[in-house]
Amino acid sequence: MKPSKFLSLSALAIPASLAFSHSALAANINWTGSNGTDWNGPGNPPWSNGTKPASGDTAVFNTVGTIAVANAVGDQVVSGMTFDTAAGSFTIGTTGGNKVTLTTGNTIQIAATLAGSNLTETIDSPIVFGSGAAAVTYNFSNLNTNASNKLVFGGALSDGTTLTTMLTLTGVNTGNNAVNGLISNGSSSALSINKTNTGTWILGNTSNGFTGGARFSAVKIGEN
């Protein structure tokens, strides 16, 4: 079966409400790349806060070049990721490597302000939505109107909670934005997908096993 492409209409990021406690206020932490390309870095991680993004923070990628960010030291926990104005093509982690846990209510996104062309922002690290006994909502979004700038997820997606997860695919970008990794319930009772807005999203894995269903507004279905 060929993967399906979904088009539709309306939605933006949901304000963050964190499922993890964090002693400091949530912040945007910028990737600097000044001390290697591993998320944790050797000694002094390559982030603007001198450590790395914490569970309530958004990791912001805004540097030029084609950059592979390794996630070799251990699993990460962040609230969101943003690929902003000057970002080149980033690849985060590997499909068989350490995972990234996302706290509820935030977004991984390509910003409307991204200035380049023919860029692909790829998250290959496996993704887990939340943890513990709390329902999760999360967004993958491409707000950039240049269709050559794509957001792609290569690693497996699963729920880390014992309740439910709602993943919303949204944005206005009509390029081949894709979730290619296996989508499953994980530890939850059900993971569901909601497609909104006018952008294009491809579910690229024919073995997906999530059971919460998929909802699409004003949908047009095509083939990849």
Image (cartoon, grey):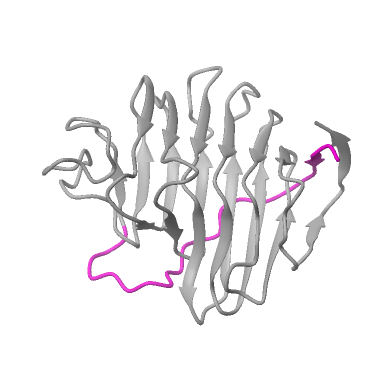
Rendered residue at 43%/54% (across/down): 99
Relative horizontal placement of residue 61, taking residue 104 as reference (left or right): left
Q: What residue span does the magenta drawing correspond to? A: 1-26
Please count the marks in the image.
Answer: 0
Specify whether 5 is left or right of 60.
right
Residue at 17% from the left image edge and 32% from the top image edge:
35
Q: In which quarter of the image is the N terminus?
A: top right
x and y, in percent, of residue 173 in the image: 66, 33
Q: Where is residue 2 in the image (x, y as percent from the top left)?
A: 83, 37
| Residue drawn where x is 18% and y is 30% of the image | 34
**Quarter of the rendering containing residue 190:** bottom right
The relative height of residue 35 versus residue 15 in the rendered view (above or below) is: above
- Viewer-side residue, 120 vs 26: 120
The residue most toward the bottom is 133
Furthest residue to the left?
43
What secondary structure do most residues of the magenta stretch adopt?
loop
Q: In this view, does 222 lie above or below 77?
A: above
